[in-house]
Image: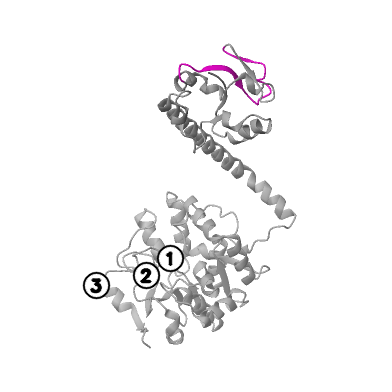
Amino acid sequence: MKIAVMVGRRNIKELEKIFSRDIEIAFFIDNNIKSLGAMIGDKKVFSPYEFSGDMVEYVVILIYAYEGVNQELTDLGFDQERIINLCDPTIDLYGYRDIFDVDAADRFRLKLRMDHMETRIRWMELSRQHFEENYLYEAADILKRRQIELPRIVSVECTCDKIISEKCSMSRYGDGEFEIILGTAKAIYQSDNAKLAERLSEILTSDVQNHIVALADDYGAMEGIRKENKETIRHYMTEEKRKQHYALLDMDKTYYNAYISRPYVIYPHDEIEKARKRFDDLKRIWDQREVLLVEGDRTRMGIGNDLFANAESVERIIAPNENAFDVYDAVYDAVMEEGENKVILIALGPTATVLAYDLAKAGYWALDIGHLDLEYEWFLRGKGYSYVPHKYNNEMPGDTMVTDISDQGYEQSIGKIISATR
């Protein structure tokens, strides 16, 4: 039986194994114009346009991407029933036992698929490399033509300097705060609350002289952030989500960088000295100052580490870890009584965003510092995210379950406790 074969040059030697002994390869088929008229062994190479159907009984296509060649042959009038596409997933090889050594052909088909996948992987890796090399130029061209708009967010370093030099208060916005505004709150620590959403929306575009608004710098290149965190951010920051954020922001306003409270875990974990410097810069804020910590009942900032060792003193107001905004007025009143002439550091979820703003308007120095203490714990361990048994973490499954502690210093630092039942 005479057949024509289309196969990649590097697989020519495989043909001896996959065909039955009674098969004769009359010629080869190739679309590459440079190959036409050439010889493979003693067999000529034709294009699909150069041979007639009566020259062979079958055309056997031994390439993974067979669809285009198959269509070309049928368009030229070749009978589809006389075209055998080895990589067609629907083919029954046992129906062609007179042509193939079925087992060998099946193995060859698997090899073609693996070769194709390896080629695709290499192409994707190369494409990514080329993208990384060229995206700055592409982005610059688009920005030059004003087709892309980005929020104005200054660096973490500038944010820290601003806070220290001007004693500015700070309210931070991450995905949690935006989700509350949009009515899709993470109920684990703060349920949807219409009043809270209204306040968060108001503060986002506010302009108070001694207060800054900080955004997570997720809208652009995310330079310096570790690959895994970039991928998480990209998964969240869809085109729809970006439009929702932009509709809430003042695109003419200068925002500061909410990643000031993330000195370690979002960056490459082996950059220890850079992380240490970021923490040391932050410690300048409360250096030799009286500090008032406003935190959840299981947050326990500074307990078990030296984050606030350089403070003159540390006092605490304890509020509920979850749904703290339900007792907002009581928390605010307590801070007004205890916070005069102190650096007020707040770790209380979205409630901290509002509280820092209101305290700033009242003339206090208040900073929403989020997960800074947990970041410091992770930094000291040097292993990225890790479970801290005695400290509440709403971001990791299971880390909201904490162990009890017995720490006299912690107990003595508590000035007031605001109960969830108020």
Q: Earlier in the sequence, mark 1 or mark 2?
A: 2
Q: Furthest-left residue in view?
A: 406
Asked if one can make out residue 421 in the rendered structure from this viewpoint, the answer is yes
Assess whether mark 2 and mark 1 are in contact (beta carbons under 8 angstroms). Answer: yes
Residue 357 in the image, given as x and y percentages of width and height:
54, 78
Residue 265 in the image, given as x and y percentages of width and height:
44, 57
**Residue 244, placed above or below residue 333:** above
User: Distance from label 1 to label 3 (Cα)?
Assistant: 22 Å
Q: Which residue is mark 3?
A: 406
Q: Earlier in the sequence, mark 1 or mark 3?
A: 1
At 57% from the left and 60% from the top, the residue drawn is 238
Q: Secondary structure at mark 1?
A: helix
**30 is within the stretch colored magenta:** yes
Tell how many labels. 3
Q: Which residue is mark 1?
A: 372
Question: Which quarter shows the C terminus?
Answer: bottom left
Q: Amino acid at mark 2?
A: Met
User: Distance from label 1 to label 2 (Cα)?
Assistant: 9 Å
Q: Secondary structure at mark 3?
A: loop
Q: Is residue 239 left or right of residue 110?
A: right
Mark on residue 301? Answer: 2
